[in-house]
Image (cartoon, rainbow, N blue to C red):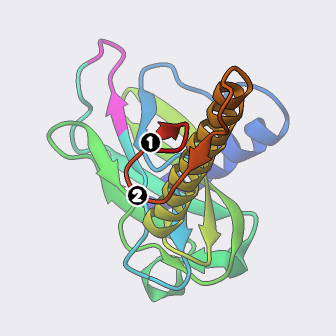
């Protein structure tokens, strides 16, 4: 059965390279998580595992279907357990399969070909991910703090502008002091 999956996956890969649509007469596959994911090379536990759902032509979950996750393009970027570039698993009761155990080794972008083969046919999908130096959550926090500082800076600039505009219409000069938020003439 494994050789059959390998042969069909190879054929699907070749068809995808030729620009033709992949064969999918009865199965449909969709990415639930992991497409566009960022894995951390430094924090190995911060990895985004791809999760796919396989459905029959009628839309029901395809249970017990073999699913093959294959890393293509840049083999030096990472691997599955045992330094393998291929992970084979089966769908659960919800028709879902997860590629757990990816180990990021170097930074860069990569593609994962995902193939499901059942009695109803073949379905394939590509997921794109990248490996970075810092965990995704840390880079998101840094972006958030930059945004907060930018908003605070814009608020301060607005206060200075308001003080200048108020002082132009007044005979007394405006003052801005550290302390309570007060804008107006001297006391």
Q: How many marks?
A: 2
Give the residues in magenta: 53-59
Tell me residue 167's x, y (percent): 68, 31
Q: Is 73 one of the magenta-colored residues?
A: no
Residue farthest to the right?
18
Q: Is residue 155 left or right of residue 72?
A: left
- Secondary structure beneath dot 2 equals loop
At 66% from the left and 24% from the top, the residue drawn is 170
- Secondary structure beneath dot 1 equals loop
| Viewport quadrant of the N terminus | bottom left
Tell me residue 96's x, y (percent): 28, 42
Which dot marks residue 124? Answer: none
Tell me residue 164's x, y (percent): 71, 34
* Residue under label 2: 179
Q: Is residue 8 visible?
A: no
Q: Is 54 one of the magenta-colored residues?
A: yes
* Residue under label 1: 182
At 33% from the left and 59% from the top, the residue drawn is 89
**How many residues crowd mark 2 within 10 Å: few (<14), some (14–19), many (20+)?**
few
At 47% from the left and 69% from the top, the residue drawn is 138
Image position of 171 with respect to 103: above or below: above
Q: CA distance from mark 1 to mark 2?
A: 8 Å
At 69% from the left and 20% from the top, the residue drawn is 169
The reply to whether callout 1 and callout 2 are in contact (CB within 8 Å) is yes
Tell me residue 102's x, y (percent): 46, 73
**Which of the pair 39/17 is nearer the observer?**
39
Q: Is residue 159 left or right of residue 141?
A: right
Image position of 3 with respect to 27: above or below: below
């Amino acid at each position: 059965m494994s050789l059959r999956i390998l042969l069909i996956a190879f054929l699907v890969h070749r068809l995808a390279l030729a620009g033709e649509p992949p064969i999918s007469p009865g199965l449909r596959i969709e990415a639930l998580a992991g497409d566009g994911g960022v894995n951390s090379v430094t924090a190995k536990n911060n990895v985004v595992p791809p999760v796919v759902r396989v459905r029959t032509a009628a839309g029901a979950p395809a249970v017990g279907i073999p699913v093959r996750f294959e890393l293509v393009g840049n083999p030096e970027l990472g691997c599955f357990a045992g330094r393998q570039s291929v992970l084979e698993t089966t769908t659960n009761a919800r028709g879902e399969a997860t590629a757990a155990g990816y180990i990021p080794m170097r930074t860069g972008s990569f593609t994962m070909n995902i193939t499901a083969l059942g009695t109803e046919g073949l379905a394939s999908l590509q997921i794109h991910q990248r490996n970075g130096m810092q965990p995704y959550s840390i880079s998101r926090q840094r972006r958030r703090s930059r945004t907060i500082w930018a908003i605070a800076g814009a608020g301060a600039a607005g206060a200075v502008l308001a003080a200048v505009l108020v002082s132009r219409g007044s005979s007394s000069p405006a003052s801005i002091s550290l302390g309570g938020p007060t804008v107006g003439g001297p006391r």
